[in-house]
């Protein structure tokens, strides 16, 4: 049986949340610019993690994880901007921002561990 990859699962679930947010913002509030930004960066986190998992080398893995981390930082920015501009309420934003921060912590930890492995090789 294959062991569950937590970052893969969490980033996929987060991407689904970003898609739902995009649909809500475009259908209910007719907001297309910021919602497209959060959709793009929020779904890119998991896409880059998938690329990292299929990477050709440890350095390739680390590079894709770094991109994923940057996308998570960007998503965090867009979510705060949507919250502070009142496109999404504080309650709705809390869960998304919390999940994004969790992804940032996990990806950051993966990067540190991988860098240590490279140095110790």
Image (spheres, grey):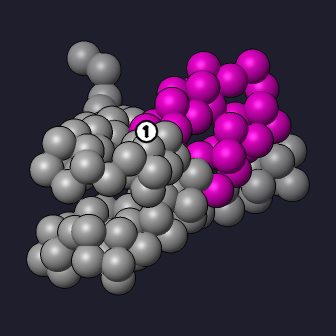
- Please say whether residue 85 is one of the residues in the magenta stretch: no
Q: Is residue 105 left or right of residue 84?
A: right
Q: How many marks do you count on the picture? A: 1
Q: Is residue 102 above or below residue 45?
A: below
Residue 51 screen position, x and y as percent? 60, 26
> Quarter of the image containing the C terminus?
top right
Asked if residue 60 shows in the view, the reply is yes
Relative to 42, is 53 above or below?
above
Residue ID at (69%, 50%): 66
Picture quadrant of residue 19: top left
Residue occupying the point 68% across, 38% down = 64
The correct choice, above or below, for 91 with respect to 79 in the image is: below
Region rendered in magenta: 43-70
Left or right: 51, with 63 as reference point: left
| Residue at the image position 13 percent from the left and 50 percent from the top | 28
Q: Would you say residue 6 is visible in this rendering?
A: no
Q: Position of residue 20 (x, y in %)?
A: 20, 42
Q: Quadrant of the N terminus?
A: top left
**Left or right: 87, with 56 as reference point:** left
SS type, badge 1: helix
Q: Nearer the viewer, residue 117 or 97?
A: 97
The residue sitting at 17% across, 75% down in the picture is 89
Tell me residue 92's x, y (percent). 15, 69
Residue 65 on image: x %, y %: 64, 45
Q: Crowdedness of circle 1 by 10 Å Cα count: few (<14), some, many (20+)? A: many
Helix, strand or loop for the magenta stretch, by majority: helix
Residue at the disc numbered 1:
43
């Amino acid at each position: 049986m294959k062991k569950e990859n937590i970052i893969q699962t969490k980033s996929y679930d987060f991407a689904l949340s970003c898609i739902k947010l995009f649909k809500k913002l475009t259908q209910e509030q007719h907001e297309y610019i910021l919602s497209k930004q959060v959709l793009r960066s929020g779904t890119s986190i998991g896409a880059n993690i998938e690329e990292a998992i299929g990477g050709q080398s440890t350095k390739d893995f680390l590079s894709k994880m770094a991109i994923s981390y940057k996308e998570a930082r960007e998503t965090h920015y867009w979510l705060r901007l949507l919250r502070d501009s009142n496109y999404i309420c504080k309650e709705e934003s809390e869960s998304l921002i919390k999940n994004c921060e969790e992804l940032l912590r996990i990806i950051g930890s993966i990067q540190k561990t991988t860098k240590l492995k490279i140095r110790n090789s």
